Image (cartoon, rainbow, N blue to C red):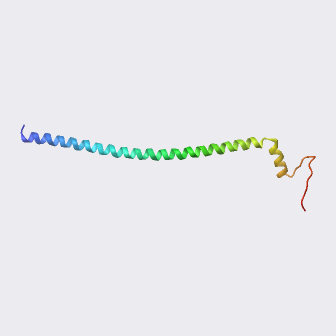
């Protein structure tokens, strides 16, 4: 082979190596960006799961309160405390 052919072959190899290295760098940067996004999304997921558990607890408390408001004990307590009503056989003591 003559010198120009060797030089072209060498330039072609160098160009190929540079292109491969460039692609490796681009893929590495893209991978780092995706890993950061994944970590951020995992944080958001953990916060949303905690929020969901809190809302489920609130929902359970509301269900319990709803069941309590349908009992006769709640009706009696509300009648006594808010309306001042008493049963027929109860005695009322008032302060002066």
Q: Quadrant of residue 74?
A: top right
Single out the residue that lies furthest toward the left. 2
| Rendered residue at 60%/43% (across/down) | 53
In the image, residue 27 lies at what x, y percent? 33, 43
Q: Quick one: quadrant of the C terminus?
A: bottom right
In the image, residue 67 lies at what x, y percent? 74, 40
| Rendered residue at 41%/44% (across/down) | 35
| Rendered residue at 47%/45% (across/down) | 41
**Left/right of residue 10 with respect to residue 44 in the rendered view:** left
**Left/right of residue 69 with respect to residue 51 in the rendered view:** right
Number of disc labels: 0
**Left/right of residue 39 with respect to residue 11 in the rendered view:** right
Q: Quick one: quadrant of the N terminus?
A: top left
In the image, residue 61 lies at what x, y percent? 69, 44
Q: Quadrant of residue 14?
A: top left
Q: Is residue 35 visible?
A: yes
In the image, residue 39 lies at what x, y percent? 45, 46
Q: Is residue 82 visible?
A: no
Single out the residue that lies furthest toward the bottom. 96
| Rendered residue at 69%/44% (across/down) | 62
**Left/right of residue 51 with respect to residue 29 in the rendered view:** right
């Amino acid at each position: 082979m003559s010198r120009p052919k060797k030089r072209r072959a060498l330039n072609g190899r160098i160009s190929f190596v540079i292109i491969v290295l460039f692609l490796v760098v681009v893929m590495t940067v893209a991978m780092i960006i995706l890993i950061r996004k994944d970590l951020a999304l995992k944080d958001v997921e953990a916060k949303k799961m905690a929020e969901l558990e809190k809302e489920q607890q609130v929902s359970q408390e509301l269900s319990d309160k709803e069941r309590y408001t349908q009992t006769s004990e709640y009706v009696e307590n509300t009648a006594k405390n808010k309306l001042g009503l008493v049963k027929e056989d109860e005695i009322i003591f008032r302060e002066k």
